Image: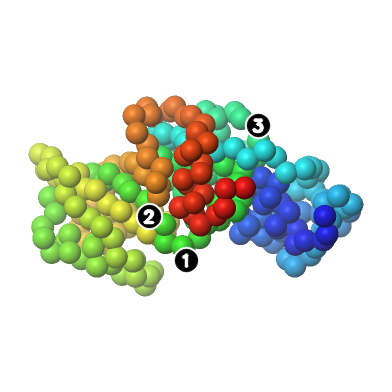
Amino acid sequence: MAEDRVQKILSRAGFGSRRGCEEYIEQKRVTVNGKLITLGAKADPKRDEIRLDGELIGKPEKKVYILLNKPRNMLSLHDPEDPRPSIFDIITDGRHLYPVGRLDFDSEGLVLLTNDGKLANRLTHPRYEHDKAYEVRVTKRPDDEQLAIWRRGVVLEDGYRTLPADVEVKAYTKSGAWLNIVLREGKNRQIRRTGSRIGLPVRQIRRVRIGPLDLGKLQPGNFRYLQPDEIKVLREYAGLSDD
């Protein structure tokens, strides 16, 4: 294998998306032959000693795809300095899995975990605008104007304007409603921030779909490995060949 950019080597080896691996380099966590590198550095994994946090990067891992129904009050990432429970307390696969479409601590539902860095990048990068579906409980009954504003896009407190979204009322509750919402982007706490911005405080968020991948009847706290046909459909949806 010829030399390649180190972030690509890390991603192929299952250490996350290309952008995530670039961040490792920017954080001074990657060495090649004992020396810290900067973005743009190249290496040959067959010849050079590449380490992340001191751990030697070996041959690319076999690709794995896991569908998890994340419970509420659980982190989507492993942080040794955070005592709160993490989804990696549930999934002990042992491989370097990257959560695609992280959920907030207090949100629940579908999370895809994989060491397929190329797929992770395609499903998370904003320019691809892949859709994700949510069931959202708001504490006030929305009127037509609020729904129309949410559908058109909302200017958040930092000046960012959200993309248009599909928003429909699924059912009314005693004092609020359940909404079906489909987004094509994933800004930090976007649904909660949008609801707050237009006077619809959000009480509960449950993600039920990422692209063609549906949560189905999987119960909170449970996970399963994707079947080959599901992997094929997911990679085709992301515009990747089935390799």
Q: CA distance from mark 3 to mark 1?
A: 31 Å
Residue type at numbered disc 3: Gly
Quadrant (top left, top right, bottom left, bottom right) of the N terminus: bottom right
Disc 1: CA contacts within 10 A as few (<14), some (14-19) or many (>=20) = few
Circle 2 or circle 3, nearest the eye: 2
Q: Mark number for residue 131?
A: 2
Query: What residue is rendered at 52% in x and 28% in y?
Result: 90
Regarding residue 190, the answer to whether it shows in the image is: no
Residue type at numbered disc 2: Asp
For mark 3, what is the residue?
94
Q: Earlier in the sequence, mark 3 or mark 1?
A: 3
Depth order, front residue of 132/84? 132
Please determine whether, in this image, residue 204 is positioned above or below residue 40: above
Please determine whether, in this image, residue 148 is positioned above or below residue 233: below
Depth order, front residue of 17/53? 17
How was this image coloured?
rainbow
Q: CA distance from mark 2 to mark 3?
A: 29 Å
Q: Residue 185 location, x and y as percent?
A: 40, 60
Left or right placement of residue 150 versus residue 238 in this view: left
Q: Earlier in the sequence, mark 2 or mark 3?
A: 3
For mark 1, what is the residue?
127
Disc 3: CA contacts within 10 A as few (<14), some (14-19) or many (>=20) = few
